[in-house]
Structures are given as structure tokens and as C-alpha cells.
Amino acid sequence: MTNLQKWMSVYGNNLPRPLSGKADKQWTEYSITVRLPEIGRRVVLENSFPPEIENRINDLIKEIPYGPIRPIHRDDCGDWEEWNSLIEPYIGQNWLEVPWLFVEFYFYRRILEAIDYFNNGKYFQVDPFRFQKTESFRASRQSINDLLKWLNEQKQEKETNKAIFGKLLLYILEGNRVDLSLWPVKEGVTRQQSARTAQNDYLMVDDVRQALDWFFARKISRLDILIDNAGFELLGDLCMVQFLLEQGVINQAVLHVKPCPIFVSDVIEADVYQSIQLLSEQGGKYEGLARFGGQLGRYMSEMKIRIECDPFWAYPLPFWKMPSHLYNDLGSSDFIISKGDANYRRLLGDRRWDYQDPFPKVISYFPSALLAIRIIKSEIGVGYEKGGYTKMVKTDPQWMRDGKWGTFQFWNGEWGESGLPGTA
């Protein structure tokens, strides 16, 4: 039996309820009623769309939160048929009544519909979030330059690969704080700079040592990363991948990205290529970035870095519903890193598991060893120590909005002899 089959036989018929704006009055309701319209308005302001497209976006904003969910219109080459099969159970309900996971993905799919992203014409495959992504790259150059210098210093000091990788994991958690759907690029960079002094103080769960011990106890040929945000975070991810390949720790890195623009800053394939191109074009005090970009380009041509953008990553579905071809492909990986809050929510099905439920119990359907790296930006979570959630809420009333709190959670990908998921 696969991990998924084992998990479904034990837990599949006893799932907690999903989050929704109607039932969850804190961050979820706020996100639907305030954040989504704000994002829609930013799309209008940051692009030069013609009046008919701006009107469609403004009409979409007016639908939130009490307008009825409707089907996606037919287009030239999009996934409207697949989407409408997912929409069908929710037709006629309003945005607060349906699951939040569905609402967020549906909102971004409606944005793409409004700008004719999937229709042949002037705005075919035009990224409506390109402005924020490009600005984030520019604002991140000095930080990434400093990171590359630090990596060289660590190697010269003969620091072990294991120790450097552990420090890089902390750095890429910091990168996950820069989420353009929550904070526009200028505010995000401020958070990026101020977060460095507080990393360890705000870790709700820290399985890094456990994950590193497992990782370096065996040969990791293929590393998969479920990529999250463009800009600073993507560049940090690429620094980590470049280090692991250069040192021979891994043979290949597979980057799983979104097939179309979503969640403002989520990476699509074009973002990876554009980032490498922009790195290669740097000069002057950023000459080191140009060398870094050139090396990444070579790794890409040698297939040591591979990009995958399965359509599943853009659908409002829990990870236990991924198609068999994707599940089997991930099963070929030796180690998987899941990045960000949205991926974490999908790992949990965006459902109200008990905060003290063990992380391996909830995600043990996954096909390979997994390290989930997350800045907490929603109500759900598992694997917290008793009283940990209460402490976080009491000491920081803005915990879902300030991007301070993070988790590293690891599962070794194996079920024990007891018939339950292993933890080490």
C-alpha cells in the first residue's frame, strides 16, 4: 500500500471541517472581505489595462463577499472545464459560505479571467503581478549579494555542509516572511530586514536538527522544493540549491512552481528564468550576482535544476487529492521541502485539525520525506506543544498578520511497524 492508501484507511473518513469566512471570524473572514478586494485594486493600479478589463476587475471586487459563486467563462486555452467541475458544488453560495481554500484560488482564477490571460490577444499570459515581483527582485539584490558572500566565508572557514544547510534553512524561512499578497514590496523588505534578529524567538516548532540528521545520514540524489514566493524568497531558494549542488550534497533539484500567476507573488516558470536573466545582467557592486546567475544557468542547461509546473498546483485541492502521476513523481524524490503558508494549508487540507495533533499523523499520506517550512499566516496548524498556540495568541494579538511566527516540521516518509506514521 502507498502512504496515501494507508492514510486514507486510517484518517480519510474522519476529517475535520475546512476553514470558511462564515465559520472563522478572525483572519479568514478578514482575508476574504478586506485582503482580496485590496489585491484586486492593486492589480488595477499597477497595470495599464484598458477600461473594459478594469471594469471586469472592479465588478469582481463588488461581488465580494455576498455575491454568488459563478462558473468560469469559456476561454481559448485555459483550464475552465476543470475549474467548473470544482466550482459546481458551490454555485450560488456566497464567498463566506464556501471553503476559504476554494475562495482564494477562485479569486485569482477570476482575476486571470478578467484580464484575458487565457485568451489569444494582447494580454495572453500577461502576469498581472509582474510589477511587484520585479520590484521585489530589485529590492533584494543587496541581501542576496550579502548571502553569497556569507556562503563563501562559511566555506573558507571549513564549516560543515550540514551546519551551513541548517543556517540556510533559517534564512529561507526569513524569506517566506516577504509575501506580496500580504505586504507590498516596500513593506515586505522592511519586514525582511527587521526579522533577522528575532528568528529563533518566534519558532513554534523547530524540527531542523531532526531533519538534518535524517538528510545527512543517507545520500540525497534528488531534492524537490514546492516553491512559494518570487523575489527575495526565490533568490534565497536558488542560493540554497546552488550550494547543495556545488558541494555535491545533491545531484538534482526539482523546483515545483505554479502554472499561472496566483497569490500575487507565487512563482511561475517565467519568474525563475527572469530571475536568472536579471542576475546575469548585474554589474558593478553586484558582479557576484552575475556569476551566481551564470552558474544557475549552467545547472539549468545540465538538468541539475529542473522546473515542473503541474496544473494541480493552481487548484483549490488538498495535497492528498493530487493526481497519481504527480504523486508518483514526488515519490521518486529523496527529500521534499514545502515552502509557505498556502502549501502548508493544502498539506492540512485547510482543515481545523487539533493544534496538538502530531504533524506526521496529519501529512503521512505524502509519498516521501518532507520538511514543511512556514511563516504562520492563517489559523490552522498542527504539532504545537500543549499551550503553545495559546501562548502565541496571548503574547502577540497580531500573530496572523505580522509575519513573525514560523515552523519547521519534519516527517521521515515512513510508516512504523505499529501501522502508524514514523517520526524520525
Image: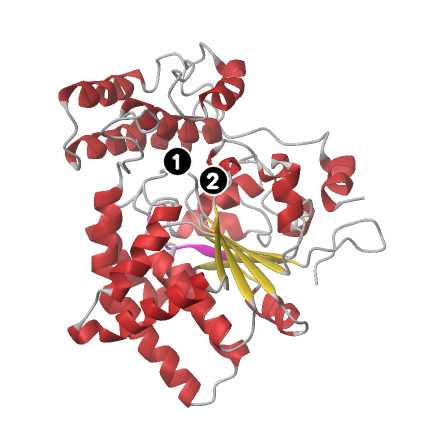
Q: Residues within 10 Å of mark 1 (few under 14, many from 20)?
A: some
Q: Is residue 316 visible?
A: yes
Q: Work out whether 335 lies above or below 148.
A: above
Looking at the image, the residue that sits furthest to the top is 92
Q: Residue at x 24, y 23 (%)?
A: 57
Residue 379 - label: 2
Q: Quadrant of the C terminus?
A: bottom right
Element at badge 2? loop
* Left or right side of 11 for 163: left
CB contact under 8 Å: marks 1 and 2? yes
Residue 10, image quadrant: top right
* Left or right side of 325 for 85: left
Q: Percent x, y for residue 212?
A: 59, 70
Q: Residue at x 68, y 72 (%)?
A: 218
Range of magenta residues: 402-407
Say how the picture is coloured: secondary structure
Q: Which residue is mark 1?
A: 27
Looking at the image, the residue that sits furthest to the right is 417
Residue 243, image quadrant: bottom left
Q: Residue at x 57, y 43 (%)?
A: 347
- Amino acid under label 2? Glu
Q: Residue at x 31, y 27 (%)?
A: 111
Q: Nearer the viewer, residue 354 or 322?
A: 322
**Would residue 196 be counted in the magenta stretch?**
no
Looking at the image, the residue that sits furthest to the bottom is 157
- Amino acid under label 1? Trp
Q: Is residue 366 visible?
A: no
Calculate the distance from the C-alpha at mark 1 to the C-alpha at mark 2.
7 Å
